[in-house]
Image (cartoon, rainbow, N blue to C red):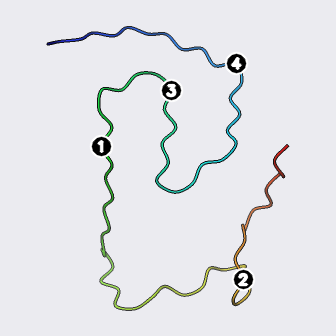
C-alpha cells in the first residue's frame, strides 16, 4: 500500500522546554523513525579523553552561558 502525504508547515514560534540525548523533535510526518547510534574510534585512541577546557576538576557545566528557562 502506497501512501502519499503532502503537507505544508509554517512555524511562527517554537518553544522547546527541554531535549535530552537520544530525544526526537519531530515536526511533520514520518513513516518510520529508526534509532541509530554509531561509535567509531577513528583516532585509534586507547584511553579516556582529557577533561574539557574551561571546566574545573569534578564539576560539570555548560561552557556557554545559557538563558534560564521561563
Query: Which-is-in-front pick, marks 3 and 4?
Result: 3
Tag 2 residue: 59
Tell me what residue is drawn at x 66 percent, y 47 percent.
18
1 vs 4, front mark: 1
Disc 3 element: loop
Front in this rendered view, residue 13 or 53: 13
Contact, CB < 8 Å: mark 1 with mark 4? no
In the rendered image, which quarter is residue 30 located in? top left
Q: Earlier in the sequence, mark 2 or mark 4?
A: 4
Based on the displayed image, in which of its 4 quarters is residue 15 positioned? top right
Query: How far is mark 3 from mark 4, CA to CA?
Result: 13 Å
Q: Which residue is mark 1?
A: 34
Give me the residue at 84% from left, 52% from top: 68
Which badge, 2 or 3, is on the more N-terminal residue? 3
Q: Which residue in the protein does label 3 denote? A: 27
Q: Secondary structure at mark 1?
A: loop
Residue at the spot 72% in from the left edge and 67% down from the top edge: 62
- 3 displayed left or right of 17: left
* Labelled pair 2, 3 in contact (Cβ < 8 Å): no
**Between marks 1 and 3, how big is the CA–CA gap?**
16 Å
Sequence order check, earlier mark of 3 and 4: 4
* Residue ID for mark 4: 12
Q: CA distance from mark 1 to mark 4?
A: 29 Å
Amino acid at each position: 500500500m502506497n501512501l502519499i502525504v503532502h503537507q505544508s508547515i509554517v512555524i511562527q514560534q517554537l518553544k522547546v522546554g527541554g531535549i535530552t540525548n537520544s530525544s526526537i523533535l519531530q515536526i511533520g510526518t514520518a513513516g518510520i523513525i529508526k534509532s541509530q547510534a554509531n561509535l567509531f574510534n577513528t583516532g585509534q585512541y586507547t584511553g579516556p579523553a582529557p577533561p574539557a577546557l574551561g571546566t574545573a576538576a569534578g564539576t560539570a557545566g555548560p561552557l556557554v552561558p545559557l538563558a534560564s528557562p521561563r
